[in-house]
Each structure stands twice: as structure tokens, then as C-alpha cells.
């Protein structure tokens, strides 16, 4: 998700980030949480970072449909109709030799609680050998730096698609972060194998070079979809709707519809960083669209 846009939404409403305003909209760290489960022989852990509560004002989700249509979808999903709640989570993969972290949350400077959740999981930051980035928006890369602006995972190689890295280096507000991580960056082309059983998957549209990661062990597999879908209710019920966070909304919508259809068919397990914690489950077909089937381990 594009946090600059999100913050501007909140600022536009006169709401401060990091503080739950009286209305209930904003960004909050929430409590540290770590939920472990297995994919084949691999141990995975979902790590909670933060919570976004956005107003349903037709300016972020369903910008081509309007707030009333979004409210109808939220109501059908059993959710409040005046807001859209998104979790911010990351995924840890332990293969017995390497410790891979998929995305890093907002970072302590922006109220991200990932490091506390990592502590709950019993993993010190220095144990992380590889950080795999789906895309360089702040809610996925902010946690690469600690509260002092130093590398949060000093021993880790940071993997990012070459298109994503070039895009990040061109962002005015990301210069300090790009400089801090530049010596640890290892770029790849989407589709590349990152580690044994871990492959990047091109999921274009949300940002230039946006990827997911597929984890395979034996006959078991899981796809970390990154920001291919944001809301477990709206993005699945109306995958064709435009989302303001997507840099190429038409391409993102096409990717969403195609990928959700494939996941519903394969019944492959999914990790979605913005779905309700721990963000693990399956995609099912529902009428002419899709629904989220949480599979909490
Ligand atoms: Zn995001």
C-alpha cells in the first residue's frame, strides 16, 4: 500500500498518524503477535506489525464505484460500512539453515511493531539471513531501518526486483533509506529463484516490479501475494474495482482477477500481508467473484 497516499488521506481528514483519533481512523501498532505454522517441512511465522483503519469515502477502494457500493460489499461481508480495516503483517520462513523475512512492515519510526513480534517469535534481528521485499512502499520496507536509522537486519541480504529497486532510488522521499540499504541490496528479475524452495512471482500493477513469493516444500506450497489484494472483503468481492494505492490500476485489476481465479482453482495456501492477522488461508470462488477462507493454523 502507498503510505504517503494513506497518510494524505488521514491528513486530509485532520487525523494524525500513529494515534487512533476519536473517530477510530488512523494507524496503530497493535500488540506484538507471532503465529507459526508449517508448509511441508518449513516452519513459517506470521508477524504482526500494525493496523490501518481507513474511512470508506470512495477515495481509496472502489474509486470507480463509489462509497455506497463499497458499503454494500462491506455489509455483505459482515463488516462495518463506514471503514475498511487492514492489517500490516510480514512473514518469516525458517528452513533450518536460513531465516528469510518477507517484507518488514512500517518500521519503528512509523509505529510498526514488527521487531516486537519478532521477539515474541524468539528470533533476534541478527539471525535474519535474507529479507525479501514484495515492493518498496513504506509499509513493506520501513522496517528495514531501526529507530536510529540503522539497518534493522544487519546480516541480511535484501532482495528486491531490479525494477522495484530502480523505482525506489528515484523516489525523492526515500533517498536516505535507499542509501542505507544500498550495500545489502541484491536485485533479481521477477520469476527468479531466491533460495531453495523460494521463488519470486511477477504480480504486476500495484507498483513497478511488484512481486509475490512462492514457498514450496514437498507437495505443500504457499504464495505470499504482497499487495496484489488489500482488503479480504472488498478486493475479493470486487477484484475489478480500481484501488487508489495501485500505480497502474488497470494492470493491477487484471492481475488481481487472473491471480485470484488461479488460486481459487489450485486451492493453494495464501499469505496476504493486509488481510486479518495472521493473513493465512485460501481463496474460494463466491458467485462470480471470490471470498477469503481463513485457515488459522
Ligand atoms: Zn501494503
Image: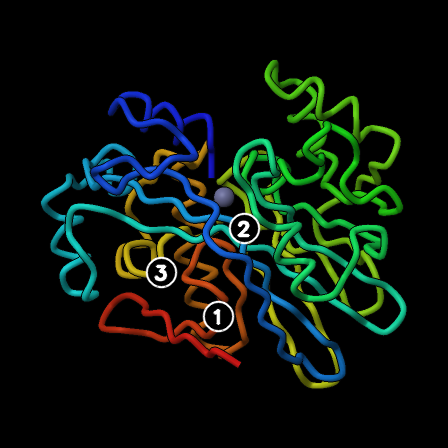
Q: Residue at 53% of width from left, 81% of height from top?
A: 297
Side of 218 relative to 253 (left or right): right
- Between disc 1 and disc 3, the foreground one is 3
Which residue reaches farthest top? 172
* Badge 1 element: helix
- Between disc 2 and disc 3, the foreground one is 2
Q: Residue at 36% of width from left, 60% of height from top?
A: 232
Relative to 259, is 252 above or below?
above
Q: Which residue is mark 1?
A: 263
Name the spot of residue 141 as percent of width and height, x first: 64, 38
- Between disc 1 and disc 2, the foreground one is 2
Q: CA distance from mark 1 to mark 2?
A: 26 Å
Mark 3 nearby-residue class (10 Å; few <14, some 14–19, many ≥20): many
Callout 2–callout 3 Cβ contact below 8 Å: no
Name the spot of residue 283 as percent of width and height, x first: 41, 72
On residue 232, the disc is 3
Which of the two labelled residues, at mark 2 and mark 3, occupies the earlier sequence position?
2
Side of 66 relative to 98 (left or right): left
On residue 211, the disc is none
Q: Which residue is mark 2?
A: 49
Nearest the eye: 266 or 43: 43
Which of the two labelled residues, at mark 1 and mark 3, occupies the earlier sequence position?
3
Q: Residue at 51% of width from left, 55% of height from top?
A: 273
In the figure, residue 210 lies in which quadrant?
top right
Amino acid at each position: 500500500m502507498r503510505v504517503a497516499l494513506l497518510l494524505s488521506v488521514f491528513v486530509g481528514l485532520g487525523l494524525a498518524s500513529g494515534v487512533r483519533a476519536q473517530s477510530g481512523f488512523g494507524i496503530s501498532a497493535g500488540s506484538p503477535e507471532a503465529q507459526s505454522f508449517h508448509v511441508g517441512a518449513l516452519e513459517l511465522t506470521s508477524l504482526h506489525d500494525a493496523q490501518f483503519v481507513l474511512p470508506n469515502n470512495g477515495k481509496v477502494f472502489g474509486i470507480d464505484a463509489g462509497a455506497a457500493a463499497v458499503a454494500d460489499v462491506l455489509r455483505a461481508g459482515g463488516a462495518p460500512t463506514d471503514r475498511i480495516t487492514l492489517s500490516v503483517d510480514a512473514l518469516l520462513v525458517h528452513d533450518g539453515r536460513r531465516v528469510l523475512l518477507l517484507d518488514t512492515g512500517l518500521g519503528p519510526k512509523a509505529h510498526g511493531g514488527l521487531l516486537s513480534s519478532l521477539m515474541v517469535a524468539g528470533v533476534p534481528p541478527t539471525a535474519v539471513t535474507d529479507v525479501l521485499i514484495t515492493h518498496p512502499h513504506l509499509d513493506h520496507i520501513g522496517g528495514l531501518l531501526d529507530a536510529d536509522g540503522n539497518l534493522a537486519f544487519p546480516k541480511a541480504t535484501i532482495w528486491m526486483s531490479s525494477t522495484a529497486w530502480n523505482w525506489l532510488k528515484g523516489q525523492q522521499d526515500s533517498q536516505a533509506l535507499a542509501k542505507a540499504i544500498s550495500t545489502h541490496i541484491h536485485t533479481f528479475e521477477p520469476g527468479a529463484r531466491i533460495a531453495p524452495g523460494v521463488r519470486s512471482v511477477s504480480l504486476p500493477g500495484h507498483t513497478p516490479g511488484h512481486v509475490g513469493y512462492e514457498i514450496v516444500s514437498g507437495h505443500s506450497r504457499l504464495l505470499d501475494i504482497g499487495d496484489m489484494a488489500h482488503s479480504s472483503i472488498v478486493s475479493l468481492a470486487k477484484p475489478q474495482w480500481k484501488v487508489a494505492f495501485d500505480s497502474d490500476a488497470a494492470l493491477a485489476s487484471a492481475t488481481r482477477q487472473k491471480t485470484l481465479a488461479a488460486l481459487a482453482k489450485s486451492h493453494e495456501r495464501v499469505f496476504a500481508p493486509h488481510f486479518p492477522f495472521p493473513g493465512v488461508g485460501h481463496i474460494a470462488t463466491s458467485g462470480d467473484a471470490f471470498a477469503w477462507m481463513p485457515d488459522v493454523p
